[in-house]
Amino acid sequence: MSDDVKALSAQLASDPQSLVFLRLGELLRQKRQYDAASRVAKHGLERHPHLADAHDLLARIYADAHDYEHAFDEWDMTLRIAPQHTGALKGLAFLYFKIGDLAQAESHLQAAREAAPDDPSIEQAFAVIRGEAGATLAPPPHTPPSPPPASVIDPPAAPERTSDAVAPLPDERIFAGLEGAQEGLLLLDAAGLVLGGALKTPEGTDVTDSVAAYLAGVSQEAARAARLLDLGSWRGLSAEGQGGHVYLVQPTAESLLLLMRDRSLPLGRLGLLAQRAAQVARAWLERQR
Amino acid sequence: MSVPAAPLGRALDLITRVRGVRGAMVVSRADGLVVAEQLMEGIKGSAVAALASSLAGRLHRAMVSAALGPSQFWHLQCDHGALLVVPAGADEGLLFVAVTEADVNVGLVRLELLRAAETMA
């Protein structure tokens, strides 16, 4: 253990309530000791659950460890606590960029630029998104010492950009940044027509259309059942199968969202993921109006 | 479908004993008719049975289509309560249905529903 880590550990041990865990966690992250860094950050969060910088630290640790789903969660939480948090905005931009969602990446970078107009790394990130030669984008806000290939990402080839304007989100990217966006999430309209996402079996067979067809009308029947029983509005419908679980929610009155996962993910967690996906879908549907 | 009434009654007893359960019933999956019920006054059993059966059918087909296998338990969460359903019987031709308050222990009701379903196996 290096002297600086020892010193910070001792400082934290003598005053567990102090914010020195932020420096210690960051130092461990820079040393690529991700497990230790994560433990420090989580212990810190137990004492300071509403500290945006602590969530941001944990997000960066996750991002460096390539656990992008949890990184997304933590940056999302950071923004709930501090909507102008530049690190989280850049972090989410990084994640969106990583999955090729340039529009969302640009949108988050724009918000970061408004919050921190003098931050040169934001302009650099914009350059990457626009495909300018030589530009690279790394997990923000600090330049990580991760292996170089992980921190230098080639601009995605698929979306061609002809201007700086933010293009409409392609349907399949509604759930950008969410785990399973391309094989375990599906957004339908009231008639059961697919608005976005996709479903695949574990063998990789695309079952999007058939599942969508069977689910048409589920919202109305669930609403009728709830009304008949004086249960108010329905909030979610979960089902356990032998090979996995599904969770249905209604992002809006005219849409239905399905989340599908294998049995390793508990139903309760599936519900949380579904609620988050519903928020994303709701925002997307709003933008389409 | 012919099902002995006594075991069904005992199974429904166990389900409705859980605090927060407003009623339970056994529904024929094929036609959505009530086979047995223990419901609090005011619950429209026959209508709920029909909807539960229809919802179960849709979920079953969707899950089989997605290669998840038939549903073993489903849970409709609402603002003021829930509807919980477990298929049972030969060829899963029956549905055990529980109607609950919002603050019920869902895990416990699920267990009782699954136990009830086992008695029909």
Image (cartoon, coloured by chain):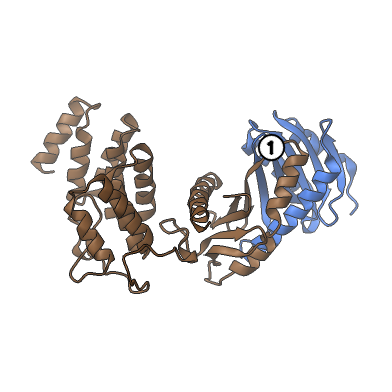
Disc 1 sits on a residue from what chain?
A: A
Report the chain shown in blue. Answer: B
Residue at 86% across, 46% down: B34
Residue B7 can be seen, yes or no: no
Would residue A76 be seen by someone viewing this image from the given angle? yes
Tell me if B40 is positioned left or right of B107 in this view: right
Q: Residue at x 82, y 50 (%)?
A: B50
Q: Amino acid at mark 1?
A: Gly
Q: Is residue B89 left or right of residue A91?
A: right
Residue at 46% across, 58% down: A175
Q: Quadrant of residue A38?
A: top left
Q: Secondary structure at mark 1?
A: loop
The location of residue A45, given as percent across then percent down, is 32, 35
* Colour-to-chain, brown: A
How many labels, in total? 1
Question: Residue at the left extreme?
Answer: A3
- Which residue is more in the foreground, A45 or B110? A45
A207 relative to A247, above or below: below
The one of A1 and B21 positioned closer to us in this rendering: B21
In the rendering, at what x and y percent does residue A236 appear? 61, 46
Q: Which residue corresponds to the image point at 33% horizontal and 61% vertical from the top-left?
A: A97
Q: Residues within 10 Å of mark 1 (few under 14, many from 20)?
A: some
Q: Which residue is mark 1?
A: A232
Q: Position of residue A286 (x, y in %)?
A: 51, 53
